[in-house]
Amino acid sequence: MYVEMKDICKTFDGFQASDHVSFGIEKGQMAALLGPSGSGKTTILRMLAGLDRPDSGDIMINGFRVNDLPGNKRGIGFVFQNYALFRYMTVADNIGFGLEVQKKSKAEIKERVEELLELISMEDLGKRYPHQLSGGQKQRVAFARALAPGPGLLLLDEPFAAIDAKVRRELRNWLRDMIGRVGITSIFVTHDQEEAMEVANQVIIINQGKIEQIGTPEEICFHPKTEFVADFIETERFSQGGK
């Protein structure tokens, strides 16, 4: 397994956000943390990113225990829900920011940025600023910026939440294809069942800080193992008009 969480517990002011959470994700897989609001999905993502520390348990990335490592030492790229692009930097400069922090040479940065602009099909937009981009384009830039330093793990926090509904499906397909091409292990948080089923290879259902079920999209949809999973899937289908 490339990523493992082993018996993780986390409490905030008496609230059990993670209750003995354990799971593993193989290298190159795309996993979705799926569940209702307040279920503990984002807490797991934040602990993986080094933004929060577990009270107990072990976080393993690429065979190493990283509990005590700061986020910038874990080999992680993070895509935020609201893009978090620098307003006064061009697209190219936003993508290259992490490489600047790593003190890469100008030639290395230029080459990597051009490579990523081509990957996200924005070769001619490197000199634009964030306010000149559509929501989908901003998310592509955020994706490229997270990939620029060459992380081994990509974390995405509700990556489609700020995207207009009309382009959301297109962006889902694009992200799935990009993850497949790059081959990076990825974990994204969502409360949208359709989103998880379309994009992920592995779905982890979370409720009240506990894992209810782990499986492929087909296993989750057609073979729910708990009453909560069965009810959650049916509720989501109904709310999405029977999709």
Image (cartoon, grey):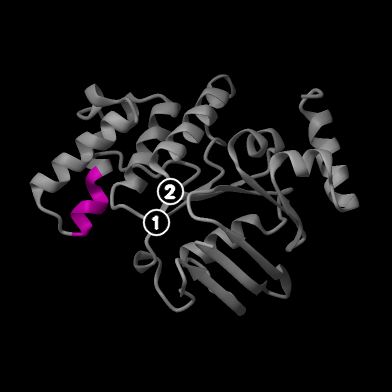
- Give the image location of residue 67, x and y in percent: 49, 76
Pointers 2 and 1 in contact (C-beta within 8 Å): yes
Where is residue 201, by image quadrant? top right
Three-letter amino acid code at disc 2? Answer: Ile
Q: Secondary structure at mark 2?
A: loop
- Residue beneath the point at 53% across and 48% down: 29
Quick check: 228 left or right of 59?
right
- Magenta segment range? 96-102
**Residue receiving disc 1:** 152
Three-letter amino acid code at disc 1? Answer: Gly
Res. 36 mark: none
Residue 178 visible at all:
yes
- Residue beneath the point at 84% across and 37% down: 235
**Residue receiving disc 2:** 184
Quick check: 59 left or right of 121?
right
Rendered position, 221 above or below 56? above
Foreground pick, 102 / 37: 102
Residue 90 visible at all:
no
